[in-house]
Image (spheres, rainbow, N blue to C red):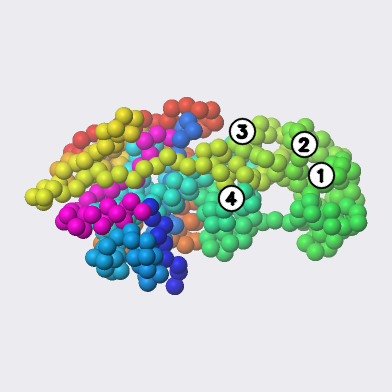
Amino acid sequence: MHPSTALHTDRYELTMLDAALKDGTAHRPCVFELFSRRLSGGRRFGVVAGTGRLLSLLRDFRFGDDELRFLRDERVVDAATLEFLAGYRFSGSITGYREGELYFPGSPIVTVESSFAEGVILETLALSVVNHDSAVATAASRMSIAAGDRPLAEMGSRRAGEESAVAAARAAFIAGFGATSNLEAGRSWGIPTMGTAAHAWTLLHDTEEDAFRSQIQALGVGTTLLIDTYDIRAGVNLAIRVAGTDLGGVRIDSGDLPIVAAAVRAQLDDLGATNTKITVTSDLDEYAIASLAASPVDAYGVGTSVVTGSGVPTSGMVFKLVARQDAAGSWISVAKASTDKGSKGGRKAAFRTLDRGTATSELIAVSDGFESVDGPDEHPRARALQTAFVTAGDIDTAFEGAGGVSAARAHHAHVREELPVRALALSRSDPAIPTVYVDAE
């Protein structure tokens, strides 16, 4: 039995539920939508991540005795609402963008169709998961683009909360990273793990040579030796003298990386270690990685920047009611109209228009009548973006676990090929493609 996720909820969601049960509106059919009004940080595209995690957390969204006791003791809701929560099981439907998919302003990333009571209390959990994971995935994708064919490893666990670190490793892997240093991420999500030794290993031993010899004895000559604890040039000489020219790799964690990497490559080649790889790991982000494109670097290890979204730690997504039935049972669109915080009401169907395989727009068909929603037949030159995650309370397990992560990673690699060239630049700009709203056909 997993811990309950039901109290990962802002109090006002339960006070709204309490009032809605009292005034009779709690069971009105509603449509909620999770979307982003704009791309945070001037990014040219966003990457969806977290929905597979959200589905697993939804399964554990149950109000057990401990949760109900807390709500009773704190007088958050009344006895009738406690009784409703005791039997809470999400029975609605959830559709949305697959993990690894690209998103743009207004993209209906997650759509929840349920009663008001069942849907409104999912807001905080949905936003906390998808906002965080998508921010990490977007940063990771930009780093992956900057790295090109060179492998990336995520190693930022010490710069995030313990659970956020695992989620960040997962999101980074979906968006193009090849490995993580976090063992829990490896166990939970099937991500390859990596790691050898830190500076503490060298400092533990009486000499750098003792440290290198011990590491090679334990891990083999194919290991990667950290060469900058003391003097880098001396470290390279020592590494090859101890390991021989078949040494797997060296790691550089400090200095002016383009200059240091070039010097280390030349030194390794002069020593005959032409196949020894160079990994760099010093405070890298997408800009630093891009600056090393012409340098003789073989792999990158990224820490703080990737797990914090490279300066954009959240995606700015919101969760809004966009449609509901009225007292007479007729569907109506609803939308917030506040300045700079407006939303667009109505049920949405989303498509990506393509011209010879390149994305040209985010096409969103808006239905006010709700009798039908546009499908692929109405937009033959576009790719449908939404899929069913939950149908009448039944969760599609294909999107969960290590299998879901692997599928999301493959999907991201595929859809990223659709981006126009201008989307690959790292500078701040408008979204790479426009969002176009049309009335449903």
* Circle 4/circle 1 CB separation < 8 Å: no
> Circle 4 is placed at which residue position?
160
Q: Is residue 14 on the magenta stretch?
A: yes
Of circles 4 and 1, the one toward us is: 4
The residue type indicated by label 3 comes to Tyr
67 or 381: nearer the eye? 67
> Circle 1 is placed at which residue position?
228
172 or 157: nearer the eye? 157
Q: Is residue 159 on the magenta stretch?
A: no
The residues tagged by marks 4 and 1 sit, at their Cα atoms, a distance apart of 25 Å
The quadrant of the rendering that contains the C terminus is: top left
Disc with the residue nearer the chain's start (2 vs 1): 1
The residue type indicated by label 4 comes to Ala
Residue bounds of the magenta highlight? 11-39
The location of residue 71, given as percent across then percent down, is 36, 63
The quadrant of the rendering that contains the N terminus is: bottom left
The residues tagged by marks 3 and 4 sit, at their Cα atoms, a distance apart of 21 Å
Q: Quadrant of residue 181?
A: bottom right
Q: For the point 21% across and 45% down, which residue is it?
A: 323
Mark 4: few/some/many CA within 10 Å (<14, 14-19, 20+):
some
Disc with the residue nearer the chain's start (4 vs 2): 4
> Circle 2 is placed at which residue position?
255
The location of residue 59, given as percent across then percent down, is 38, 64
Asked which secondary structure carries label 1, the reply is loop
The residue type indicated by label 2 comes to Gly
* Residue 398 shows up from this direction: no
The residues tagged by marks 4 and 2 sit, at their Cα atoms, a distance apart of 24 Å
Asked which secondary structure carries label 2, the reply is loop
